[in-house]
Amino acid sequence: MNNQRSGMLMPALVGGIAAGVLTAVPFLGCLCCLWIIGGAMLAAYLLARNSPASLSAGDGAIVGIFTGIVAAVVDSVVSIPFQAANEEVFRKFMEQISQFTNEMPSGWETWLEKSAGGISPGLFMLGLVIAAVVFSAFGALGGVIGVSLFGKKKTPPPQGASHEIPQNTGDRQP
């Protein structure tokens, strides 16, 4: 198993990067849990392809957890430019609303300026930790599913085993 763990890094990176990028894209991100499960299944497939022996469900869970952590980091980094674009769209939307509405709450301009200031490093790290925990759980699930689909190797029959089917001679024994 230790040999398999050393080979888990590359599959976890590939699956995590794919899942993290797909999760960070605004309209594709609504399926984030499925992307994480799919990325972990991809990692399990890559691990099984390079493994000479069958993989256990534990192997799939471990590679899935690694995939989830990588996906959380990639998602957090890749989504930064999208957050700035979303803030700009939100600001323009609020400006348009203010032209047509006389009854906006008092101090809404101040609230808008504060919300347009970006995300603080503390909130960024908190979001990263929460995403890593959630993505790891879904990654473990995807890894176990992936190993159940791709991780079983067909073992050859023992060398002395006969492949003959016993013939029915018609004699019935009590």
Image: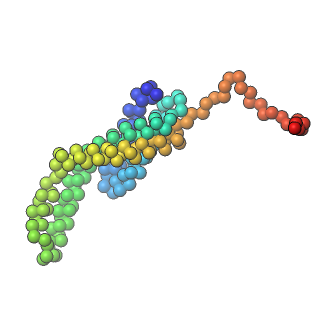
Q: Residue 161 location, x and y as percent?
A: 71, 26
Determine the residue positioned at 80% across, 33% down.
Answer: 166
Frontmost residue, 127 versus 86: 127
Residue at the extreme top: 160
The quarter of the image holding the C terminus is top right
Identify whether 24 is placed above or below 103: above
Q: Residue 91 location, x and y as percent?
A: 17, 62
Determine the residue positioned at 34% across, 50% down.
Answer: 23
Q: Residue 96 location, x and y as percent?
A: 17, 70
Identify whether 94 is placed above or below 83: below
Frontmost residue, 31 versus 139: 139
Determine the residue positioned at 15% across, 58% down.
Answer: 115
Query: What is the quadrant of residue 162 in the picture?
Result: top right
Identify whether 31 is placed above or below 53: below
Determine the residue positioned at 19% across, 59% down.
Answer: 88
Q: Is residue 132 left or right of residue 55?
A: left
Query: What is the quadrant of residue 72 in the picture?
Result: top left
